[in-house]
Structure formats: C-alpha cells, structure tokens
Image (cartoon, rainbow, N blue to C red):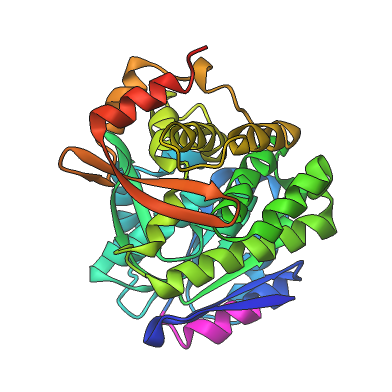
C-alpha cells in the first residue's frame, strides 16, 4: 500500500492506494471520519451494477457506522449537473441526514465531483470521503478538493474547493472497468509526467502499451498522484501554480462539451494536450518535436490524437467561456520540455487562431 499525505494544515488528509479488501477500505474510511450521525453513500449506478465490491463495501460500512444508506447516481457525466445535485440533496434531506452526517462517494470522476459538490453545499457543508473506481478519478478528480458540475455554457463552471477527509483508491475496482475508461484515464497520467515529472514521462515513453500491466500501472498511478499532491499542497485554490494541472484542459474541455460528452474526459484531454503542445511550438516555447513525441506516445496508449476531426466552430466558441479566461485573454498552460510547465496569458483571438492553425496542413 502507498499512502500520500495532502498537506493542507487542518484540512490535510491521506490518499491510500492499493488493492484493498473491502474491510480495509471500510476501516480507512472509518478512521478518517470520526463518529458521524449517518453515512450517505453516493454510488455511480453502473459501478453498482457491475462491481460485487459495492454491496460488500456497503455491508462493511453498515457494520461499523450508523445509518448507512445508498443513493444511486446517473452514470458518468450525466450526474454532473445541477438537476442531479438537487435530487441528491432532496434525498439527503428526506432521509434525515444532518450536519453530523458524512457523504461517501464511490465511482469515477463525475461521481466523485458530484459527491464532493453535494457535500460542499448540503447544509452549507458536511464531511465526505471518496473511493474512486476509475483510473482518471484515482489520479485526478478525487484528489485536491475541486468539486463541480457542468452547465449548458460549459464544463465545471459551477463548483467549490472542498477537501475530502480521505481518499481510498482501491485498484481492485479496475477489474470491472471498461477498457475505454482505463485508456482514457491514462491521459491524466501522461499529463502529470509532462507538467512535473520527467521520469514518469520517460517511463511511459519506454513502456508504451506495457504501461497498462498492473504492477507498472500501479507505479505510474502513485507517481501521478504524487504530482497532484505536491501541486495542491503548494496552491490549494489555484491562485498560481495549481493552474498547471489544467494542461490540455482549455481546448480539451471545449472539445468534450462540443461532443455532447460523447467523448470521455481523458479522451478530450488527450486531444487538448496535442493542441496545447502545437500552440507552445507556434509560440516558440515548447521544444520543437515534443508535440510529435507526445502524439506518438498517446497513440501507442490508444488515446485519440486527431484534433482536426474534433475541431469545429463550436469548440472555438466554447474556448471563450473557459473558466480560466481573464477579460480578453486565457490563462493557458504550456510545456517547454517534459517535467516543466509554465503559465501564459494568451489573448483569446490569438489562442483561437493558433489552435486552428494546429490542425491545418
């Protein structure tokens, strides 16, 4: 087992990573949440259907904690909206959960975002714990306290910074994870290497598809989570350095939203990184040839790299409502070389022109 501490003073918490038994998962949750008046377990409905670990974990929690009840969330991105949040809050209220209650979120990145945002706003804030079940949620969404939902204008435009009490990343959940979701999650691992861990990027380049072998994947997960922990510990509320975690996300979010969320988040981030590296090269910041190296790596990992196939007028419009926009500029993340990231305010029109140029012959 690997345990990484997110150092945020009185909001500090642990991220546990291993193939756990359900009793071990329950014990770590219990050790971190004290004596709640009740436990509301919010579970992605697909995970509840396919994973035998969910009923086993419910039983383990019920044997240790009071008033443990389950509420199913619509699968995937369909739970990341205000209507779904309202339904969950209504269920919490009707079920009698008070401010001494704890929310436990089980699922992928959408479910953990939903659970964290509900915990942040229900009764003006209750404690919560997370058990991510996908690679993407494990290395990114569940760690750092960014919670949020989508609205029609764009992705993650409504949310809050709200830290969990513990994250228990039980890699055994990956046994029932669809291959497409496992592959999509690898985009965030590549991102971590590019922005802050040259050794991780080199390892992924050397291994290619072999990075999905369980032992290699576990090591890559630990390295990627360590990157996020270090960045969040330095800048909890994205007033500075934490913004480097958005590498590939400005264009990626726009592509994801324009697809009607048919694309998985990691797939969109893969395309967004390709575009961001092209912008970096066009501006003379990114080392020549790095974009092609990353394209080759992403393709070997079975991630999409054809930005041209996804770029549209709608994507360019959606870049305008990115939450990182500052008046007529966007705070954009560029990677000069593997393991290094910088922030650059790029005029909106200039950014759109360079993104468009990235797909031209």
In this view of the protein, which residue sits in the foreground, 28 or 320? Answer: 320
The picture places residue 16, in percent across and down from the top left corner, at 64, 74
Whether residue 58 is situated above or below residue 98 in the rendered picture: above
Most common secondary structure along the magenta stretch:
helix
Query: Is 201 left, or right, of 163 in this rendering?
Result: right
Based on the displayed image, in which of its 4 quarters is residue 45 positioned? top right
The picture places residue 333, in percent across and down from the top left corner, at 41, 47
| Rendered-image quadrant of the N terminus | bottom right
In this view of the protein, which residue sits in the foreground, 98 or 168? Answer: 168
Whether residue 45 is situated above or below residue 131 in the rendered picture: above
Does residue 51 appear anywhere in the picture?
A: yes
In this view of the protein, which residue sits in the foreground, 67 or 185? Answer: 185
Give the residue at the far left of this rendering: 327
- Residue at the location (58% across, 51% down)? 194
Q: Which residues are magenta?
A: 27-37
Query: Is 348 left, or right, of 147 in this rendering?
Result: left
In this view of the protein, which residue sits in the foreground, 104 or 320? Answer: 320
Whether residue 179 is situated above or below residue 94 in the rendered picture: above
- Residue at the location (44% across, 31% down)? 282
Residue 302 belongs to the span the image colors magenta? no
């Amino acid at each position: 087992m690997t345990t990484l501490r997110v150092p945020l003073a009185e909001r500090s918490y642990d991220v546990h990573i291993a193939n756990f038994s359900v009793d071990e998962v329950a014990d770590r949750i219990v050790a971190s949440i004290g004596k709640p008046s009740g436990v509301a377990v919010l579970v992605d409905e697909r995970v509840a259907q396919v994973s035998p670990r969910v009923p086993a974990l419910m039983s383990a929690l019920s044997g240790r904690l009071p008033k443990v009840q389950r509420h199913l969330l619509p699968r995937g991105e369909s739970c990341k909206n205000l209507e779904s949040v309202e339904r969950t809050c209504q269920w919490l209220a009707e079920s009698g959960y008070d401010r001494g209650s704890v929310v436990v979120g089980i699922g992928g990145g959408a479910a953990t975002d939903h659970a964290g945002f509900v915990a942040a706003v229900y009764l003006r804030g209750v404690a919560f714990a997370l058990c991510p079940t996908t690679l993407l949620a494990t290395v990114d969404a569940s760690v750092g306290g960014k919670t949020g939902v989508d609205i029609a204008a764009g992705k993650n435009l409504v949310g809050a910074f709200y830290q969990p009490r513990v994250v228990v990343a039980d890699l055994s959940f990956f046994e029932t994870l669809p291959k497409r979701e496992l592959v999509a999650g690898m985009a965030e691992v590549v991102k971590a290497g590019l922005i802050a861990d040259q050794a991780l990027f080199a390892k992924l380049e050397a291994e290619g598809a072999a990075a999905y072998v369980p032992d290699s994947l576990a090591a890559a997960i630990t390295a990627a989570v360590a990157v996020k922990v270090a960045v969040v510990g330095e800048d909890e509320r994205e007033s500075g350095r934490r913004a480097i975690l958005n590498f590939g996300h400005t264009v990626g979010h726009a592509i994801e939203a324009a697809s009607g969320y048919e694309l998985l988040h990691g797939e969109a981030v893969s395309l967004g990184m390709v575009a961001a590296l092209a912008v970096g090269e066009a501006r003379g910041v990114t080392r020549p040839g790095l974009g092609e190296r990353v394209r080759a790596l992403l393709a070997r990992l079975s991630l999409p790299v054809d930005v041209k196939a996804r770029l549209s007028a709608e994507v360019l419009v959606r870049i305008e409502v990115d939450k990182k926009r500052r008046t007529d500029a966007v705070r954009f993340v560029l990677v000069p070389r593997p393991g290094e990231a910088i922030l650059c305010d790029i005029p909106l029109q200039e950014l759109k022109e360079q993104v468009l140029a990235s797909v031209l012959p």
